[in-house]
Image (tube, grey):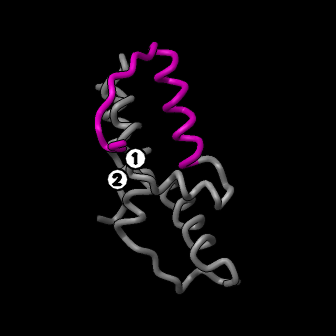
Amino acid sequence: MDELKKKAVMLSQGEINALKKAILYLKFECEDVSSMIFSGSTLINSAFDELLVNSDTYEREAEFYHRENPDAQELIVQKIKQQQYPDSNSHEEETIDDEYLRCCLHPFKKTGN
């Protein structure tokens, strides 16, 4: 089975909206560090992009998502540090992989590019 082979799926606008909301919740609202398995997934990011492109409100949403979001970035950075350094009391000095951060922040852009 080829996981990267494209499949046609028919969804209503309501289903598209529900899936986008679920993905955004997992990435940017869920504080559970275990949600990082989804936040950093390139497959989930790709699915989100497909949902976005097929949304009735694509133009407006694309403009909103293709910008920096410092609040989302702050949450993601904290979750990555908690995931990578679970025993550290202070996460100030730890570094995180820039590409992983970009993937977790998708569809938003990383601040301070």
Name which quarter of the figure residue 3 lies in: top left
Q: Is residue 25 magenta?
A: yes
Name the residue at 50% across, 53% down: 39
Name which quarter of the figure residue 103 lies in: bottom left
Q: Is residue 11 magenta?
A: yes
Residue linked to disc 1:
43
Name the residue at 43% across, 54% down: 105
Which region of the structure is painted magenta?
1-28
Q: Which image quarter is the N terminus in? A: top left
What secondary structure is marked by label 2?
A: loop
Q: Which mark is residue 109?
A: 2
Vertical arrangement, residue 105 with respect to residue 81, above or below? above
Work out how far the residue at label 1 is from the one at label 2, CA to CA, in angstroms. 18 Å
Name the residue at 59% across, 64% down: 79
- Amino acid on which disc 2 is placed: Lys
Label 2 CA crowd tier, 10 Å (few <14, some 14–19, many 20+): some
Vertical arrangement, residue 95 with respect to residue 39, above or below? below
Viewed as shown, does residue 47 lie left or right of 74? left
| Residue 15 percent location from the top left of the image | 51, 19
| Residue 70 percent location from the top left of the image | 46, 56
- Amino acid on which disc 1 is placed: Leu
